[in-house]
Image: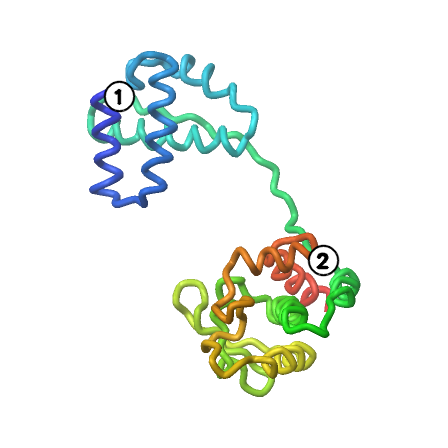
């Protein structure tokens, strides 16, 4: 590893205080270039770097590598390790429309759920809740009984530590009430629980929506937004 790269990693670790995951990503991207080309990054010309980088056919992976290089060379320029500022243009990635499910598709999936069991009642209520409120799965999993008042949902674990109030359909409230009737009094405060009576995890919630709908919980958020626009 070159001295400049060591200085850069120290900069992003101490001065920028980036997460461990981000630092490891930068280190992996940049040391790989130096190892493959057997030279320090600042001694390489732009053409040599690009000839190696463009071997990545996945545009998202390619852009991550280019972003790492841009960040490194910007640091070297501001630290006066180099005289010229080097910047690589990122590859254009076409924006895809968010995936969503229609009301009919969700209704068909809900009919497949066996509500004669406690787990079935939970899965049915969870899917309805996500579709009826458009909450993020992180917000949903921290739902408590007191967060639903009349036909309003108080989202207390919103993104950015903000709170908001959203309407919730009666059918979703009814489904939740039928589900919570089966609770044992020893269960903890959160509404969404696993079979052990502990708070449901993100992975478990993903498995539930994947099982019946073939999508992640976030797709139900897109479906909710699409339904609002359509309405």
Seen in the picture, residue 160 relative to 14 is either above or below; the reply is below
Q: Position of residue 62 (x, y in %)?
A: 49, 28
> Residue 42: which quarter of the image?
top left
Q: Quadrant of the N terminus?
A: top left
Seen in the picture, residue 90 relative to 196 is either above or below; the reply is above
Q: Residues within 10 Å of mark 2 (few under 14, many from 20)?
A: some
Q: Is residue 50 left or right of residue 96?
A: left
Q: Position of residue 157 (x, y in %)?
A: 44, 69
Q: Secondary structure at mark 2?
A: loop
Seen in the picture, residue 201 relative to 157 is either above or below; the reply is above
Numbered label tally: 2
In the picture as drawn, the residue positioned furthest to the bottom comes out as 150
Which of the pair 130/210 is nearer the observer?
210
Which residue: 58% across, 56% down? Answer: 206
Does label 2 or label 1 sit earlier along the sequence? 1
Q: Is residue 172 left or right of residue 58?
A: right
Whole-angstrom CA distance, mark 2 to mark 1, is 49 Å
Which mark is drawn over residue 118? none
Q: Is residue 107 left or right of residue 46?
A: right
Which of the pair 26/45 is nearer the observer?
26
The residue carrying mark 1 is 1
Q: Quadrant of the C terminus?
A: bottom right
Which residue: 63% across, 56% down? Answer: 219
Q: Residues within 10 Å of mark 1 (few under 14, many from 20)?
A: some
Which mark is drawn over residue 101? 2
Asked if the residue under mark 1 is in contact with the one under mark 2, i.e. CB atoms within 8 Å, the reply is no
Q: Secondary structure at mark 1?
A: loop
Which residue: 57% across, 60% down? Answer: 205
Q: Position of residue 192 (x, y in %)?
A: 54, 71
């Amino acid at each position: 590893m070159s001295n400049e790269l060591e200085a850069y990693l120290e900069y992003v670790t101490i001065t920028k205080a980036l997460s461990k995951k981000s630092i490891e990503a930068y280190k992996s991207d940049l040391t790989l270039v130096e190892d493959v080309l057997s030279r320090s990054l600042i001694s390489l010309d732009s053409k040599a770097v690009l000839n190696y980088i463009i071997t990545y056919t996945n545009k998202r992976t390619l852009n991550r590598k280019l972003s790492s290089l841009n960040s490194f060379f910007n640091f070297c320029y501001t630290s006066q390790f180099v005289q010229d500022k080097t910047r690589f243009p990122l590859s254009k990635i076409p924006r895809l429309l968010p995936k969503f499910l229609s009301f009919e598709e969700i209704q068909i999936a809900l009919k497949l759920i066996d509500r004669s069991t406690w787990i079935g009642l939970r899965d049915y209520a969870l899917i309805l809740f996500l579709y009826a409120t458009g909450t993020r799965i992180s917000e949903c999993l921290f739902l408590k009984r007191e967060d639903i008042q009349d036909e309003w949902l108080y989202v207390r674990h919103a993104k950015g530590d903000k709170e908001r109030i959203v309407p919730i359909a009666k059918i979703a409230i009814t489904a939740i009430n039928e589900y919570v009737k089966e609770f044992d009094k020893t269960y903890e405060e959160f509404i969404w629980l696993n079979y052990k009576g502990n708070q449901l995890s993100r992975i478990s919630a993903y498995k539930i929506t994947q099982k019946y709908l073939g999508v992640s919980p976030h797709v139900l958020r897109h479906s909710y937004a699409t339904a609002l626009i359509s309405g």
